[in-house]
């Protein structure tokens, strides 16, 4: 079974699907349904045991996608997993709940809850709440680590450019000597 939203360029595939046109809601489950959408020329895939979509009804409601449980997301520059996810398509804000783990290039990001703010269909900021931890591999296979109560990661062209640590910040960093020619 396949559901497609031409307006949002989203396709959801699964074993069982229900669509309530009058309510603007769809639910897909069975055999690990998968949602795919194009973001900046790259495809974002999301799977979970259940995918649920709700279209906006007027100016006071948001267009939402909910995924639960056992969420997995994959994009060429971002992979991750969480217990549940909600994506506000109107505000471009994604919430990953219950111990999400994300991987970007050489970094692993872990926290109790993560909120991802998208801008122009690419990650702009990532808010990590409670027990935030980032580990990054350097060129010599050392693992630089930063941890704190909460963190905000700022992205530029898909790469982490800066991280603000709020509360109990700790860092383990391996300094590298310059290369001599």
Image (cartoon, rainbow, N blue to C red):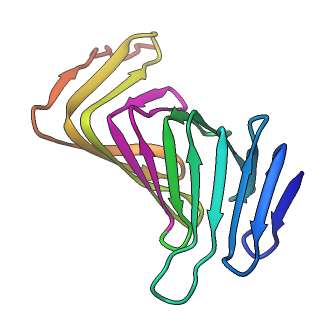
How many marks on residues? 0
Q: Residue furthest bottom?
A: 58
Judge from the rendering whether residue 105 lies leftward or rightward of residue 30; answer left or right: left
Return the x and y of residue 125 as percentages of the image width and height: 39, 54
Residue 49, position as x, y percentages in the image: 66, 38
* Residue 131 falls within the magenta-colored stretch: no
Quarter of the image where one finds residue 150: top left
Is residue 96 magenta-colored?
yes
The residue at the point 37 percent across, 30 percent down is 110
- Residues 179 and 55: in front is 55
Residue lying at the far right of the rendered structure: 1
The residue at 37%/15% (across/down) is 143
**Magenta highlight: main SS:** strand
Does residue 144 appear anywhere in the picture? yes
Q: Is residue 172 left or right of residue 136?
A: left
Q: Residue at x 74, y 58 (%)?
A: 38
| Residue 10 shows in this picture | no
> x%, y% of residue 84?
50, 42
In the image, residue 50 sits, relative to residue 23, either above or below, namely: above
Magenta segment: 92-116
Residue 141: image location, x then y, percent: 46, 10
Q: Residue at x 40, y 15 (%)?
A: 179
Query: Where is 164 relative to 31, above or below?
Result: below
- Please determine whether, in this image, residue 125 is positioned above or below residue 153: below
């Amino acid at each position: 079974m396949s559901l497609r939203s031409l307006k949002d360029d989203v396709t959801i595939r699964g074993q069982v699907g229900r669509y309530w046109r009058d309510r603007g809601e769809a639910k897909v489950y069975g055999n690990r349904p998968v949602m795919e959408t194009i973001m900046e020329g790259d495809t974002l895939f999301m799977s979970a045991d259940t995918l649920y979509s709700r279209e906006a009804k007027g100016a006071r409601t948001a267009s939402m996608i909910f995924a639960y449980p056992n969420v997995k997301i994959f994009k060429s520059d971002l992979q991750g997993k969480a217990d549940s996810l909600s994506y506000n398509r109107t505000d471009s804000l994604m919430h990953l709940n219950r111990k999400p783990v994300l991987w970007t290039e050489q970094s692993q990001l872990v926290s109790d809850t993560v909120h991802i703010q998208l801008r122009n269909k690419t990650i702009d900021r990532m808010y990590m709440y409670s027990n935030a931890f980032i580990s990054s591999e350097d060129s010599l296979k050392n693992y630089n680590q930063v941890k704190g109560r909460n963190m905000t990661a700022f992205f530029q062209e898909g790469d982490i450019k800066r991280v603000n640590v709020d509360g109990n910040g700790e860092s383990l960093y391996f300094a590298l000597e310059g290369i001599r020619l």
